[in-house]
Image (tube, rainbow, N blue to C red):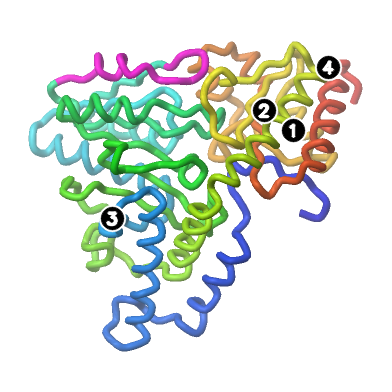
Amino acid sequence: MNGRIYLDYAATTPAAPEVKAAMLPYFTDSFTNPSAIYQSAAAARAAVDRARGEVASLIHASPSEIYFTSGGTEADNWVLTAICGMQLAERGSCHLIVSSVEHHAVLHTAHYLEEKGVDVTVLPVDREGRVNPADAESAIRPDTALISVMTANNETGTIEPAGEIAEIARARGVRMHTDAVQAFGHIPMDVRSLPVDFLSVSAHKLNGPKGIGCLYIRSGVPIRSFLHGGAQERGRRAGTENVPAAVGFGTAARIAAEKMTERIRSTSSLRDRLERRLLERFPDAAVNGGGADRLPGHLNIRIPGVDAESLLIAMDMHGVEASAGSACAAGSLDPSHVLRAMGLSTEEAMNSIRLTVSHETREEEIDAASDIIAECAARLRNAVF
């Protein structure tokens, strides 16, 4: 990073050295199409199968339940459009339940489906950003096809009661999807005890390559194919496999599984240090979602009287990189839909920034960044530019 301090790991992460090394041969020496019948193609196929097993192992799934996609957005789109489309075709009506703090990959897809005749219920959240499972249960109707509630929020890190909601959905005969893009590889997840039917993942959030993710589809659960053409991904997602990316994804998943406990400890300690230092400098600041269980590396903090956009620009000029929320909403002049759903005013949302650290962050970077953030915020408060 050339001396710059990166605090936006929720947006994306650098590919680990082991990931890059594992991928490299499949760009050149082992470049063949895994769908071909000759020997080198069989080796490529074996590499994809091995990667599928490594990804599956991280959530205790069967490799046959993992379908590679181009990322979390595609996986989210696949589930919502396929399940709702199936029910509309079969029954003529369809009801979808989502939470108000979902990633735009879910919310915008839900809005698209509304235009196609799907009835959508958007669940509220409390001040910490949590969905009440009772609200999900109350929203279920005879024509409810799917509930989609994320595992953990990408802006605040709030961990949602997806497991409780999935239990309710199963008891009522409703399919359950969770967007686990932000949580996968960062906290323990086990689909043997988490009764979801579908789970979306993206590799670049855990030191894997961009452009690949997966959809977990519980064995026996029917779903339409998303891309039509060849027989790849067992006929459910056509297109030549991205072998290097799959290998990189599998490697990242394996490393995450091996080092998860250590990473949770170090990352949460760094996050807490950053939070403590900023709150000491600004006693009137507040942590959005601070009263909930959060992902280890997330800190969403609001500093009254300080415009987030101006603060981020000032931080960037001093070598600290962060964001106000989802990278997919960067450039938007609107306040965060997540923070507004949590009950924050427009001004409070506009005073909030997201700082996310990882196991790669160093303690000295935390101290330097907190000093820079505090100095920039103090200048903005006093209107000294």
Q: Which residues are magenta?
A: 125-141
Circle 2 crowding by C-alpha within 10 Å: few under 14, some 14–19, many from 20: many
For the point 64% across and 31% down, the residue is 354
Frontmost residue, 269 versus 137: 269
Residue that carries the numbered disc 1 in the rendered image:
312
Q: CA distance from mark 3 to mark 1?
A: 43 Å
Residue that carries the numbered disc 2 in the rendered image:
353
Labels 2, 3: front one: 3
Residue that carries the numbered disc 4 in the rendered image:
381
Q: Is residue 276 magenta?
A: no
For the point 40% across and 81% down, the residue is 32
Image vertical order of residue 170 relative to residue 83, above or below: above
Marks 1 and 2, the one that precedes in the sequence: 1
* Left or right relative to 235: residue 200: right
In the rendered structure, are the residues bearing label 1 and label 2 in contact, judged by CB atoms less than 8 Å apart? yes
Residue that carries the numbered disc 3 in the rendered image:
62
